[in-house]
Image (cartoon, rainbow, N blue to C red):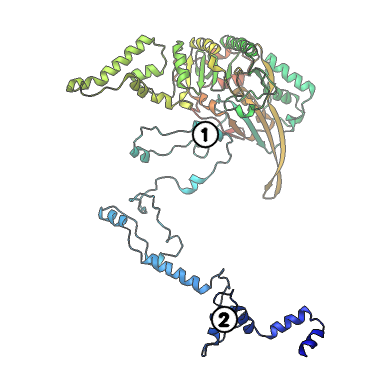
Amino acid sequence: MAWMIRANAPPRTRRERLGDGAARGPHRARAMSGSGAGSRGGGARMRGNLLPGCPPRPPPGVMDLSVPGYSPSFKRPPETLRLRRKRGRSLGAAERPEPATRRAARAAGLPLRPFPAAGRGGGGGPAGARRNPFARLDNRQRAASEPPEGPPRGQQEAPGRFLDSNQENDLLWEEKVPERTAITELHQTPHVSFSESDIPPSESTELPVDWSIKTRLLFTSSQPFTWADHLKAQEEAQGIIQHCRATEVTLPQSIQDPKLSTELRCAFQRSLIYWLHPALSWLPLFPRIGADRKMAGKTTPWSNDETLQHVLMSDWSVSFTSLYNLLKTKLCPYFYVCTYQFTILFRAAGLAGDDVITALISPTTRGIREAMKNEGIEFSLPLIKENGPEKRKASGTGLRHGEEQAISDEDEEESFSWLEEMGVQDKIKKPDVLSIKLRKEIHEVQMDHRPESVVLVKGMNTFTLLNFLINCKSLIATSGPQAGLPPTLLSPVAFRGATMQMLKARSVNVKTQALSGYRNQFSLEITGPIMPHSLHSVMMLLQSSQNGSFSAGLYTHEPTAVFNICPPKDNVLDKEAVHEELANCGLHPKTLDHLCRTPVLGKLSLRHVEMSDYIYNWRS
């Protein structure tokens, strides 16, 4: 009868069924779920709860309240467990025995730092810092009376005021310690750095001559540079005429309104002009060293056309010869030859304190020096100091092959004469001639592609160098983006086959934050192959336009920085006679006088220049 009533009853809702399950109680529901065959150990848990004397299982939520920091899945361990584990670690570090290596060092009598005490084992402060395991055993704490080995940390980490963007070539031009230096000398030799922060600034009314090529100039001043923008057609034409006719223009020391000064704007236009060969508007022809990435993907129709390559090289030879003839007759003060491997600076007699034509080549390799020596070109390595036959060999005195072989044989006989004196010359195997030659020339290979490899050619040997460069096949790249492209010729004056080019200049006005708010900061940027005469001319113009107050950041083409070396001079020149002979070279008299001075920068170049009250302050 009951089943009939249940069958006729209306169906129950989901809420009513859930209410019946909750009415049975949580213990009954857990017991029912644990009694099945699929639950692991469910029956045991049920019997444990039903044994007499055992407390019943607490309902869910009670464990969370009884144990602080309790996590059901043990994702966050309790605070008590963490404290116990931390205390155990600190006690273990304090009771750790002294290492065997430390005991052996102490037995040898070496001074050591005190072993960490128990009280600072897990402190985590400065006193508990772990000793460097790679430090020397005698690296003890320095007493207060001992002087420090180097400058304070603040001086070492103090950066320069201006950053140099030419650090991409530092790996090529950085100083390296020779391989034969002893280990004791490495510890005693202090580290020498030529960064801006290490070299003290210099003050003078004149800047030192800088023969390096600049790639970028950035001038900043509190007065605007708007006078350098948007030249009129008449001003641009007049500036070009002044350059071509070498007209001398003298500006006053201070200009009240530079924007209205036509002479200033024409002189600025003149200072931006330079002459280039070959001229290909779609290819960046300076710098050539490391320019493969910039030239990649450009159209080079001559790369696979030998006829076109021959035509380009023929035109380049005519232009190169024309430049050298102008230099020889003192109608051109200097010019640069930029190849994909090295750069050459040709200077007329009278510049840089030399009484003859000079040529500086940097960087060079042993192959180039051997080829020049075979052509009979006499040269010297100004930055290499050697003695005896090695000096004659490195200086490239043009010895014949027989004389060089005789010198080599004499050196070998002197090297093994002591074996004959001892009577053991037959028992000891002598090294072959090739290994001896490689051992003697290893120092020449080590200086390749470095500033120390700079080569100096003087006098009539420069004409021999001219013929060597024209006929040298390795002067032009045979593969890559620069394949078949002749070297770049840069000159301050016109020559046969040259193209007039202009440096790019633009002025920018920005606002910088000051104590009282914001102030205007004006800047002038000049980019391109900036040669020494352009740098000096722009400096003279800014001295007048900015009332003797501005600063400049100079960015150097690093392979040309070594052109500032000062080789030994044979004679002292008469400045008046030099000025008379170079009066028609196309430079301003003040610029010519500046370039006639002896270089003093060595392997460095100007990096930062600041003028205040018409006094220069520079860093190199």
- Indicate the secondary structure of the residue bearing disc 2: helix
Question: In this orientation, does residue 247 appear?
Answer: no
Q: Which mark is residue 121?
A: none
Residue type marked 1? Asp
Residue 436: x %, y % from top left: 33, 21
- Quadrant assignment, res 314: top right
Q: How many marks?
A: 2
Residue type marked 2? Ser
- Quadrant assignment, res 491: top right
In the rendered structure, which disc, 2 or 1, sits on the residue that comes first in sequence? 2
Q: Is 592 left, or right, of 382 in this rendering? A: right
Residue 220: x %, y % from top left: 66, 36
Q: Which mark is residue 170?
A: 1
Q: Is residue 137 above or below residue 401?
A: below
Q: Is residue 465 above or below residue 264?
A: above
Residue on which disc 2 sits:
66
